[in-house]
Image (cartoon, coloured by chain):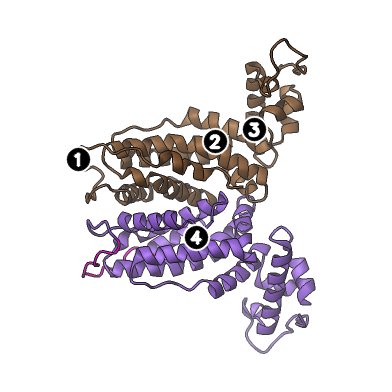
Chain colours: A purple, B brown
Amino acid sequence: MAAARKPKPKSKPLARRASVGARRNPDSEAAVLAAARGLLAEKGYAGFSIDEVARRAGAGKPTIYRWWPTKADLFIAVYAEDKAASIAAPDTGSLARDLAEFTRALWGFWRETPSGRAFRALVAEAQASQAALDALRVKFLPERIDLLRHIFARAAARGEIDAADIETLLALYIGFNWFHLLTGRVEDEVEAIERMARIIVRGGGAGPTRAPEAAPQAKPRARTRQLALQLTLLPEE
Amino acid sequence: MAAARKPKPKSKPLARRASVGARRNPDSEAAVLAAARGLLAEKGYAGFSIDEVARRAGAGKPTIYRWWPTKADLFIAVYAEDKAASIAAPDTGSLARDLAEFTRALWGFWRETPSGRAFRALVAEAQASQAALDALRVKFLPERIDLLRHIFARAAARGEIDAADIETLLALYIGFNWFHLLTGRVEDEVEAIERMARIIVRGGGAGPTRAPEAAPQAKPRARTRQLALQLTLLPEE
């Protein structure tokens, strides 16, 4: 709250680089994120604005805009911290169990926290604002997906799924969650979630097994295609 | 365009029923939908309003509101007509081929038609408006899903997938499409679409077969759970 307005950096002996002015002061950053979190809890995404966050944090608007060019970017920073604090990445040794556990935690996060509840508003904003869509695609999804991609990659290494299917399985899995969120159905539907998890495993199935609890095949599979397919989340424009 | 303002019905010899005032005049309805379609093509969903549609159709606002209580409802009526006119339900004898064909047609519809392009705005509006969310869940999804449910039910009858998984497969499939739409990626990605279709079939697989082209099993499966699970799309409130 007491972060001082950061003065514009004067000319320095260092060679000028585009990134110099963007270097962050950790105290100011923490103050801005705390103010953003508080505003979000009070007013939701509709009442969330960089102007109001700056006022509450006692920070300069130019500084905030340099770090987070849009409201969507600042929201994503808060969301990422809150989500990391509230959801541990599961590692149960079974993809179906990992997915069921992660899904229930994610839906709970979406239902019960201010930034979780606001996420659907970011998706909505991205339908009308190119800047928000870019933030969603370039800043939000790649990092969020990374955690999930590790869960799927471990399953591929155990032989549960085919590594070549990982990106498509991710899109199906994330789509399932978004569809439930955007139609207002993220209650704790244990049976639906477990059925989804079994279908995902079977759909990516490296072998003819139907039960996710079956002993994993011995041969680990390579994490192919991952880099190439990651690019599909970057803007085409 | 020339539809006359519909006078309020006077007392009639018929027993009064709640639905009498809501009976539609087909000419007026067609004029309203044509005006709505034209407005959507010109201004998109943001510039779409019942007031402006009424002005263009020469129809009374109370009449339009009686038939379509919100902008979302009127949009859904136009979208449904346009989609039915532009996408034929595939019936190739293979779920993977049906899904690939339907997906490519759907993504083309979303890219290339005014009502298709506006759909993402309806999803966005539903994140802030309970009335739009209700319209999406109660009027939009059940009818749209019905066509897809038939495709999956035929596949279950052929033995390609387990009928008990149909609702979850539908949510995964629809979620995959929404995720691509809402992140601006509904280009004609033939390979991604065909991979998704294969995974869906394998995920719902009634047997150990991995190839969707494999000979279907003989025994048709019952369409169980369908009615009960359909209800999950109605509002919980």
The residue at which mark 1 appears reads as B215
Viewer-proximal residue among B31 and A69: B31
Q: Earlier in the sequence, mark 1 or mark 3?
A: 3
Q: Amino acid at mark 1?
A: Ala
Q: To which chain does the residue with label 3 belong?
A: B
Kindly indicate whether the residues beneath marks 4 and 3 are on one polypeptide chain: no
Image quarter (top left, top right, bottom left or bottom right) of the N terminus of chain B:
top right
Q: Position of residue B177 (x, y in %)?
A: 46, 47
- What separation in Å lies between label 1 and label 4 (alpha carbons)? 39 Å
Q: Amino acid at mark 3?
A: Leu
* Callout 1–callout 4 Cβ contact below 8 Å: no
- Give SS at disc 3: helix
Kindly indicate whether the residues beneath marks 1 and 4 are on one polypeptide chain: no
Residue B57 located left or right of residue B75: right
Q: Position of residue B144 (x, y in %)?
A: 49, 36
Q: Which mark, residue B74?
A: 3
Q: Is residue A15 above or below residue A104?
A: below
Q: Which mark, residue B113?
A: 2
The residue at which mark 4 appears reads as A234
